């Protein structure tokens, strides 16, 4: 008998029992979509782990202040940064910047790994983040997790979005003076010839919108079904894959399974749980007890 797999299964089942009871009313998913010149980038926000930073970002998003901004900084192997500047009436980038809200308190804790999104801020002031954010291109944890109080990671790119981010990072850059010393451009020869960076040359963020997805829709196909359970099952325990992190706490855990179960039909839930590998008898018995507890809780 292989004891380790059985113990892992039992541990997962027991954590699911706790999750069903404690997290029955978990918060809704928070997914945003960047529509850029080079394609779309979807990201899950960590609204439980970093509530202040998430609310701050969504304030800019929902007011449309990111629409028409551009990527103003790209450092290969490090970061791609935006959220701060847009073009003027002539289509030339402007240092006037996005109208900002008061700075948000720093919320470090989630590591600055490749694919994460973090708030940019002023040097020497941990609580100075406003509108600007950046995508981490590499594992920057050794530096950014500690520098200036630690940089707040408030989301992670999901799906194929990092291929778009990498495309941006691969572009040639021009130096137009601080804060535009590393501006990625689509065609550097044209930029040099015209001696300026116009809207048509830059990587523009056409819009950032919050997606209306059902809780538990972990593959983002518009329905909550067995495929979403597989996404959870294949990534449970992960802190570097956010697709099934339904409660946005920075890890795919049993609470996220509870969210999926609440959004799926009873038949789909039964079929998915029945497919759990041995030892199924004890596992299903515990899950049955859990479901009974949820039913009783709802009837109170």
Image (cartoon, rainbow, N blue to C red):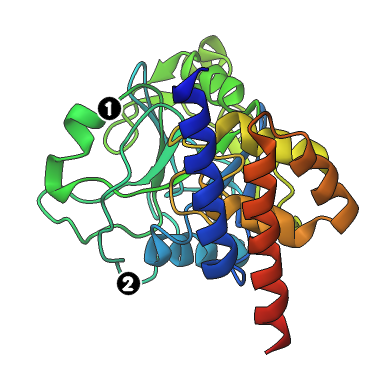
Q: Tell me which residue sits at (18%, 30%) in the image.
A: 143
| Residue 25 position within the rendered picture, expressed as x and y whole percent measured from the top left | 61, 72
Q: Quadrant of residue 98?
A: bottom left
- Residue 122 can be seen in this image: yes
- As drawn, the residue found furthest toward the left would be 124
Whether residue 129 is situated above or below residue 27 in the rendered picture? above
In the image, taking residue 79 as reference, residue 282 lies left or right, namely right
Q: Tell me which residue sits at (67%, 34%) in the image.
A: 231
| Residue 206 position within the rendered picture, expressed as x and y whole percent measured from the top left | 66, 44
Tell which circle, 2 or 1, labels the residue nearer the N-terminal end: 2
Whether residue 19 is situated above or below residue 191 in the rendered picture? below
| Residue 28 position within the rendered picture, expressed as x and y whole percent measured from the top left | 63, 64
Whether residue 261 is situated above or below residue 59 in the rendered picture? above
Q: Tell me which residue sits at (47%, 19%) in the image.
A: 169
Of 96 and 226, nearer the camera is 226
Of 91 and 204, nearer the camera is 204
| Residue 93 position within the rendered picture, expressed as x and y whole percent measured from the top left | 48, 41
Q: Are marks 2 and 1 in contact (CB under 8 Å)?
A: no
Q: Residues within 10 Å of mark 2 (few under 14, many from 20)?
A: few
- Quadrant for the C terminus, please: bottom right
- As drawn, the residue found furthest toward the bottom would be 300
Q: Which mark is residue 102?
A: 2
- Residue 220 can be seen in this image: no
In the image, taking residue 46 as reference, residue 230 lies left or right, namely right
Q: Secondary structure at mark 2?
A: loop
Q: Tell me which residue sits at (54%, 26%) in the image.
A: 165
Q: Secondary structure at mark 1?
A: loop
Q: Which mark is residue 289?
A: none
Quickly name the residue at label 1: 140
- As drawn, the residue found furthest toward the front would be 1
Q: Quadrant of residue 299?
A: bottom right
């Amino acid at each position: 008998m292989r004891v380790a797999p059985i113990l892992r299964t039992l541990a997962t089942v027991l954590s699911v029992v706790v999750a069903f009871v404690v997290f029955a009313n978990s918060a809704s998913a928070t997914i945003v979509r960047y529509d850029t010149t080079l394609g779309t980038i979807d990201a899950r926000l960590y609204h439980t782990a970093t509530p202040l930073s998430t609310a701050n970002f969504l304030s800019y998003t929902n007011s449309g202040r990111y629409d028409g901004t551009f990527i103003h900084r790209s450092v290969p192997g490090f970061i791609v940064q935006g959220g701060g500047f847009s073009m003027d009436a002539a289509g030339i980038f402007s240092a006037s910047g996005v109208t900002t809200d008061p700075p948000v308190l720093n919320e470090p804790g989630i590591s600055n790994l490749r694919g994460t999104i973090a708030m940019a801020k002023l040097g020497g002031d941990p609580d100075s983040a406003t509108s600007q954010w950046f995508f981490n291109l590499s594992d920057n944890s050794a530096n950014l997790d500690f520098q200036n109080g630690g940089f707040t990671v408030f989301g992670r790119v999901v799906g194929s979005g990092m291929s778009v981010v990498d495309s941006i990072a691969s572009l040639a850059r021009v130096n137009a003076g601080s804060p535009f010393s590393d501006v990625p451009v689509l065609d550097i020869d044209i930029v040099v010839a015209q001696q300026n960076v116009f809207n048509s040359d830059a990587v523009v963020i056409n819009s950032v919108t919050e997606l209306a997805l059902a809780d538990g829709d972990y593959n983002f196909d518009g329905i909550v079904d067995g495929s979403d359970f597989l996404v959870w099952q294949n990534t449970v325990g992960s802190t570097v894959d956010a697709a099934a992190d339904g409660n946005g706490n920075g890890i795919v855990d049993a609470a996220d399974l509870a969210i999926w179960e609440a959004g799926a039909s009873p038949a789909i839930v039964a079929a998915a749980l029945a497919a759990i590998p041995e030892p199924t008898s004890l596992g299903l018995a515990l899950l049955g007890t859990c479901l009974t507890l949820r039913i009783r809780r709802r009837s109170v």
